[in-house]
């Protein structure tokens, strides 16, 4: 019993931190660009596929972990510049529809290029096998994923809270006119934020591509889960997204122990209740970005 | 080279389609604004038409393509002709979606006037196809993969011939092997949807009948990414062996996690053949070593018939055949033989001749049960071993269960 | 063909004012319905499969119409209309297989079920606005989806099967009424045509009624309507439930036609596709989304042959959003207003796009 709980806790934390990587981008993009990015799941999926390519061609997982997210960032830049940028002065509804179309296109392209078969990113020997964590055996790779994603989230957190860049980003979200009056190119900031979100999603894609099967349905599969996280955390709040991601990760992991079929139901019910009771999210109501 | 004949006839359909679509657009506009229509002129007095209602996009695309490849191979060996008539192959994508499955089935039956329907892959789609095929009652139906026993059990559809397998066959017969060779106690792990539940129940029934004990049952939702909580339950059950039903991406995630957690050192993994299939093994790799599964076809099966099949297949399509290709191949055999014997495509006559036939298949001898139209064939117990070059893994047949049939599900003639 | 377009177009240009469809527009609708009715027997003799596709087009047109009534017209973006569509479908499936195949019993029942589900979702959701409202409807619809997929009602009621789980309910017969059997597709076509046409008229009248004006007012300025003494929340819930009734009707028509009801009907992808249909057709015009729905069904059918159809379909959405935000209806209107300037307009749109990208 204690073993099960410990294992579920470890999994929950790992799920939470990887979800946070994806949700962070989604919520930052919403907070600053006012865009609900339906293609965010597709970017995560692209990360995993680019990861299989780099790891397969260059034979190095480590290169994949660095290069694949950067490639996703490039795709993100293209999406922002060529399709979102002309639409910023329109109703946010159009952003949803646009990114929905982009997500469908990316999924189609992936099937066209890599086929529909499940793939996986080969994990280096260093990270394979399992170690004992207290009374349970746990795969080294899963611990690695937990460590890397936690580290990244911590770095991003510090960057947003402390650095000038973070302050600029938050200021742009609040008052674009004032920021541009200061002589800063807001559209560059927007592109930067979108690319940054894309890169984080790409990292999550590579990390999870080593432990989960990589297939064309994974993009639309993760997006709703990420929405739940972002909504519960409060749309636009980074801190909220991290807390909510941990909460959802743990609920999913414990839910699998108790009542697997009801877990989804519970998650959607949570989302609905938060939206009704506190639309600004459970966490970060007072926070700016 | 005769494969080109098949290919040509196929491409002629497509171009024919676009011409008539234009004609139609004109006629549609003529009647006033209902231009949004599409279709082919269905004037096909000559030749035979086989309609594939299979997924060609999405998760199951590989399965759909393999079935068509297998079918084409057999036609190719017959120079693309049956009784001197050319065979036209029409592919329609079900996207493994229930409603789309109904739509394309109707399209194949009504618009393309198919003489035979081959497909689908997913059982939910097959269930939804029963009604349209029965309503039109104009074509014979070769079910080349959907294995849910209820397709037969709910009404014993007259034109339905399972050239593949049913879920009883890929689960229950393994019980004796597990009981006698591995352990008298098991934990059951399954994807929690109709097919997984059926497989689990069939295995349990057979295993308990033999005197075995089912220690625990662990169901994981379809599409589970992280199996660790479920693996915890499996480990805690203390059973010596596991019988599992997972397929596709679930099978990859499950088998890999099973090894990552080191469970493969504590208990023996067994399962239906889809747990460790050609489409999952490349992504599972060394994690799958030493696991047992049950299926009606294995690429490495050691027989002259299969070796020829594998050679021919590799020659035509470049790549080794999987179980789905074999199912497609046997669908072609059944179709061609029935057309030749009855001298036409009357589905009722074809039914009468099909129930009498015996096929020389790469999977071994195979025939249909006259009441259920289910296949009667050998089932093979396989173990995952390293391939000869040591670079990948493959299934090796270690035991053959002869002429496995299964329940009659209340069907009679 | 052209006159139909023109009539629609003219009526549309006055839409910013009061009437949603002028008398000439009504005439155009009559002509379209008449043409469809006349065309059906020809199609049946010539190529029966067209009928099949027409029926599906009309059903999704009805579904799009129901969403446009709350979204385009009343401004409530529902990302959960699949729930009402599916609920109506499941209701029809259960009634037909357990009770009766009488269309006059089952179809109204499907509408009631759709309205009740929409009423529940709406009652909980209307307190939120804009994107939050959309997210709430999405969450509720997914709740219904998961319940259907896991067959939770069966577990609660202690019966073996209620929704049929992931396989759904299959082998559903088509309707019968006054001794008429609706099994032949041609007959079913007329049933669908009648239902869709009546629904269009009903929703049109509703839109032009005082009730509809209030809904429109809510879209334009919620506070003002509130200030004028209307119970905004009640109007919203009522509007949403009405829309749900028609979505339920669409489900009630679709399921017996397809012979199967399955959880996929309630999935958010259907809701998403529906929003795309609205946008392609042109929001808030009622007739535009119907055309949009028909177009999407048609495109999916025609593109299915291509391996890369998803790229094409996604690409069309993207292009429409960027260059033609008012959709088909908008394009038709601008061509009607100024047929000579199509090229100039297109050029201007592209220049505008390039300017914005360069910004």
Image (cartoon, coloured by chain):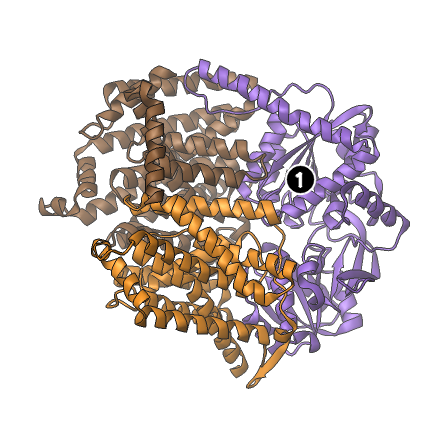
Total residue callouts: 1
Name the chain letter of the residue that bears numbered label 1. Answer: B
Q: Quadrant of residue C211?
A: top left
Q: Is residue C209 left or right of residue A205?
A: left
- The residue drawn where x is 49% and y is 55% is A72
Q: Is residue A22 left or right of residue B193?
A: left
Q: Is residue B152 above or below residue B253?
A: above
From the rendered image, report the letter of the chain displayed in orange.
A
From the rendered image, report the letter of the chain displayed in brown.
C
Mark 1 is surrounded, within 10 Å at the Cα level, by few (under 14), some (14 to 19) or many (20 or more) other residues, namely some
Q: Is residue B110 left or right of residue C179?
A: right
Q: Is residue B304 left or right of residue B350?
A: right
- The residue drawn where x is 66% and y is 36% is B52
Residue C350 on image: x %, y %: 36, 33
Q: Give the colour in which the image draws chain B.
A: purple
Q: Residue furthest top?
A: B30
Q: Is residue C138 above or below residue C358?
A: below
Observer-nearest of C169 and B306: B306
Quadrant where the C terminus of chain A sits is: bottom left
Q: Quadrant of residue B259?
A: bottom right
Residue B246 on image: x %, y %: 63, 60
State whether residue C120 appears in this view.
no
The residue tagged 1 is: B157
Observer-nearest of B147 and B25: B25
Q: Residue furthest front?
A: A183
């Amino acid at each position: 019993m204690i073993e099960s709980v410990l294992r579920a806790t470890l999994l929950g934390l790992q799920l939470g931190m990887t979800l946070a990587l994806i949700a962070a981008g989604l919520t930052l993009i919403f907070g600053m660009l006012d865009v609900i990015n339906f293609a965010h799941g597709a970017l995560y999926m692209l990360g995993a596929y680019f990861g299989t390519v780099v790891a397969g061609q260059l034979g190095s997982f480590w290169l994949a972990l660095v290069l694949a997210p950067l490639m996703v960032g490039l795709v993100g830049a293209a999406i922002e510049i060529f399709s979102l940028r002309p639409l910023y002065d329109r109703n946010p509804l159009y952003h949803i529809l646009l990114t929905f179309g982009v997500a469908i296109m990316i999924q189609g392209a992936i099937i066209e290029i890599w086929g529909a078969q499940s793939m996986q990113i080969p994990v280096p020997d260093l990270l394979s096998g399992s170690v004992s964590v207290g009374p349970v055996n746990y795969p080294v790779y899963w611990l690695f994923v937990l460590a890397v994603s936690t580290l990244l989230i911590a770095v991003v957190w510090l960057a947003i809270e402390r650095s000038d860049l973070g302050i600029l980003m938050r200021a742009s979200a609040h008052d674009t006119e004032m920021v541009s009056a200061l002589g800063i190119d807001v559209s560059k900031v927007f592109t930067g934020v979108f690319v940054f979100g894309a890169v984080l999603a790409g990292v999550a894609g590579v990390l999870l591509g080593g432990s989960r099967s990589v297939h064309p349905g994974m993009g639309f599969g993760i997006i709703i889960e990420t929405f739940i996280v972002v909504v519960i955390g409060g749309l636009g709040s980074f801190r909220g997204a991290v807390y909510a991601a941990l909460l959802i990760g743990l609920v999913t992991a414990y839910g699998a122990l108790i009542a697997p079929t009801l877990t989804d139901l519970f998650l959607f019910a949570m989302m609905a209740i938060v939206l009704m009771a506190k639309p600004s999210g459970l966490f970060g109501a007072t926070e700016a970005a | 080279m005769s494969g080109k004949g098949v290919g040509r006839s196929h491409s002629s359909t497509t171009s024919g389609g676009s011409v008539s679509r234009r004609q139609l657009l004109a006629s549609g506009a003529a009647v006033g604004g209902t231009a949004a229509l599409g279709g082919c002129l269905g004037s096909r007095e000559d030749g035979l038409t086989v309609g594939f209602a299979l997924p060609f996009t999405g998760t199951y695309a590989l399965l759909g393509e393999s079935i068509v490849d297998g079918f084409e191979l057999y036609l190719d060996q017959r120079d693309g002709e049956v009784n001197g008539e050319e065979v036209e192959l029409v592919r329609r994508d079900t996207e493994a979606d229930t409603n789309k499955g109904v739509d394309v089935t109707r399209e194949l039956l009504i618009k393309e006037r198919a003489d035979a329907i081959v497909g689908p892959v997913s059982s939910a789609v097959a269930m939804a196809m029963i009604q349209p095929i029965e309503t039109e009652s104009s074509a014979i139906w070769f079910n080349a993969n959907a294995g849910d026993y209820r397709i037969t059990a709910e009404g014993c559809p007259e034109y339905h011939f399972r050239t593949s397998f049913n879920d009883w066959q890929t689960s229950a017969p393994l019980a004796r092997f597990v009981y006698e060779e591995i352990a008298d106690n098991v934990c059951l792990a399954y994807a929690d949807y109709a097919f997984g539940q059926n497989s689990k129940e069939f295995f349990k029934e057979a295993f308990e009948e033999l005197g075995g004990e089912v220690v625990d049952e662990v169901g994981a939702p379809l599409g589970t990414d992280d199996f660790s909580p479920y693996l915890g339950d499996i480990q805690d059950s203390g059973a010596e062996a596991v019988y599992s039903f997972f397929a596709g991406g679930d099978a990859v995630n499950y088998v890999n996690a099973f090894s990552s957690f080191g469970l493969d050192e504590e208990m023996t993994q067994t399962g239906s053949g889809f747990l460790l299939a050609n489409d999952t093994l490349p992504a599972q790799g060394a994690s799958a070593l030493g696991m047992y599964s049950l299926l009606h076809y294995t690429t490495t099966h050691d027989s002259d018939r299969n070796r020829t099949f594998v050679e021919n297949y590799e020659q035509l399509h470049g790549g080794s055949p999987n179980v789905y290709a074999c199912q497609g191949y046997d669908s072609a055999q059944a179709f061609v033989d029935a057309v030749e014997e009855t001298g036409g495509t009357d589905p009722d006559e074809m039914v009468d001749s099909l129930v009498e036939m015996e096929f020389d298949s790469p999977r071994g001898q195979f025939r249909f049960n006259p009441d259920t139209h289910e296949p009667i064939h050998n089932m093979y117990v396989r173990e995952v071993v390293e391939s000869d070059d040591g670079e990948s893994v493959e299934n090796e047949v270690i035991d053959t269960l002869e002429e496995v049939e299964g329940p009659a599900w209340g069907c009679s003639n | 063909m052209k006159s139909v377009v023109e009539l629609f177009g003219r009526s549309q240009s006055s839409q910013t004012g009061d009437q949603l469809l002028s008398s000439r527009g009504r005439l155009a609708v009559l002509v379209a319905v008449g043409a469809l009715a006349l065309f059906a027997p020809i199609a049946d003799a010539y190529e029966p499969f067209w009928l099949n596709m027409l029926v599906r087009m009309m059903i999704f047109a009805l579904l799009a119409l129901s969403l446009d009534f709350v979204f385009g017209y009343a401004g409530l973006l529902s990302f959960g209309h699949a729930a009402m569509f599916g609920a109506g479908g499941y209701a029809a499936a259960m009634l037909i297989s357990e009770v009766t195949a009488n269309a006059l019993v089952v179809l109204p029942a499907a509408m009631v079920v759709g309205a009740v589900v929409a009423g529940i979702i709406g009652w909980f959701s209307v307190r939120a606005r804009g994107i939050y409202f959309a997210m709430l409807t999405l969450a509720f619809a997914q709740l219904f989806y998961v319940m259907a997929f896991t067959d939770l009602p069966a577990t609660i009621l202690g019966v073996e099967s209620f929704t049929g789980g992931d396989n759904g309910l299959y082998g559903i017969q088509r309707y019968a009424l006054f001794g008429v059997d609706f099994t032949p597709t041609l007959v079913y076509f007329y049933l669908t045509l009648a239902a869709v046409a009546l629904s269009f008229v009903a929703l049109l009248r509703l839109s032009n009624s005082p009730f509809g004006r209030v809904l429109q007012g809510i879209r334009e300025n919620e506070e003002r309507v509130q200030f004028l003494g209307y119970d905004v929340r009640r109007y919203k819930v009522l509007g949403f439930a009405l829309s749900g009734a028609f979505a339920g009707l669409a489900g009630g028509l679709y399921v017996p036609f397809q012979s199967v009801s399955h959880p996929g009907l309630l999935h958010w992808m259907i809701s998403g596709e529906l929003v795309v249909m609205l946008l392609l057709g042109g929001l808030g015009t009622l007739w535009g989304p119907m055309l949009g729905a028909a177009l999407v069904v048609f495109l999916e059918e025609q593109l299915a042959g291509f391996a890369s159809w998803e790229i094409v379909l996604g690409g069309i959405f993207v292009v429409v959003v960027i260059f033609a935000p008012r959709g088909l209806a908008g394009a038709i209107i601008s061509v009607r207003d100024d047929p000579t300037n199509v090229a100039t307009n297109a050029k201007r749109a592209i220049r505008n796009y390039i300017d914005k990208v360069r910004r």
